[in-house]
Amino acid sequence: MEHYTLSRKNMADLLHSLNGQHDKTPVMILKEAWLLTNKEEMSSLITSGIPPIFEKVLKHTKNEIGFSINEIVSLGNQIEYTQLSPSAVQNWVKRDIKELVGRPQIGKKYNVDQATMLLIVEDLKSSLDFDSIRKILTLIFNNPEDRSDDVIHPIDLYSAYAAVFEKLHHHPLPTVDGSCSMNEWIEQFVHTECRNILPAFNQLKEEQMDAVLNVLILSSLSVQAAYYQSAAKHYGYAALFMQEK
């Protein structure tokens, strides 16, 4: 059976679209993601079935969409190299990052910005503990109930480092400088790409630019760490499977 997996860039585009900030509809973005991943006609999607969380997104007609914790987990688990659990995310919003996410903004459900914040935290916890995550993210995010005072919006941060990871994992390898190791090259590549993104945030002060740059680099490298963790688990499970009698 084909898998319906989104890259982080796909997810960033989808989140922007759900917030009315993208020129493509959620349907268009999900179609493109399917065709890119599976190289098949859309008819094969009918056979495989659409994940329930995407059915919710496709049926959405209101101005603002809300997600339960379980729905945010389902949404997140459609992203490559991501593995969320409802119990863990429930603990995050009640205790670990309560002040970053805030209370549900759409009745008993969380809005797109809050869902995005949880996806960011999932990526950062590949490298940081929760205390560090709180300190880092409060450099650029303020009151979760009023996003107007943030240095940048959660979706903009997610979209920015998703674009860096997209180039690192889904684009052809550029010419590599033979004078440095592959690890050094990856780090330099991430630094360069993050700096290239900064002009998009031209409304920021210099000290805010520095904070955003550091969080961007950190987030990009954390996603890379999540990729390595996922790859290591894959080979670990394969080794154990081969030993089964």
Image (cartoon, helix red, strand yellow):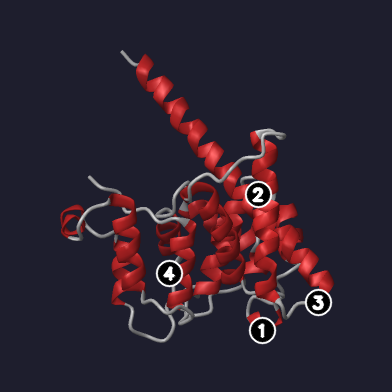
Residue for badge 2: 189
Crowd class of label 3 (few under 14; some 14 to 19; many from 20; radius 10 Å): few
**Lower position in the chain sequence, tag 1 or tag 3:** 1
**How far across and down, in percent of the image, does residue 101 sit?**
61, 68
**Lower position in the chain sequence, tag 3 or tag 2:** 2
**How much space separates mark 1 and mark 4, taking CA atoms?**
21 Å
Q: Dot 3: what SS?
A: loop
**How far across and down, in percent of the image, does residue 2 sit?**
25, 47
Residue for badge 1: 148
**Lower position in the chain sequence, tag 4 or tag 3:** 4
Q: Dot 4: what SS?
A: helix
Q: Dot 1: what SS?
A: helix
**How far across and down, in percent of the image, does residue 40 sit?**
22, 53
Q: Closer to us: mark 3 or mark 2?
A: 2
**Lower position in the chain sequence, tag 1 or tag 4:** 4
Residue for badge 4: 14
**What type is the residue that disc 3 sits on?**
Lys
**Lower position in the chain sequence, tag 2 or tag 1:** 1
**How much space separates mark 1 and mark 3, taking CA atoms?**
16 Å
Crowd class of label 2 (few under 14; some 14 to 19; many from 20; radius 10 Å): some
Q: Closer to us: mark 1 or mark 4?
A: 4
Q: Dot 2: what SS?
A: helix
**What type is the residue that disc 4 sits on?**
Leu
Q: Quadrant of the N terminus?
A: top left
**How much space separates mark 4 and mark 3, taking CA atoms?**
29 Å
**What type is the residue that disc 1 sits on?**
Ser
Give the residue displayed 41% in from the left and 21% down from the top. Answer: 240
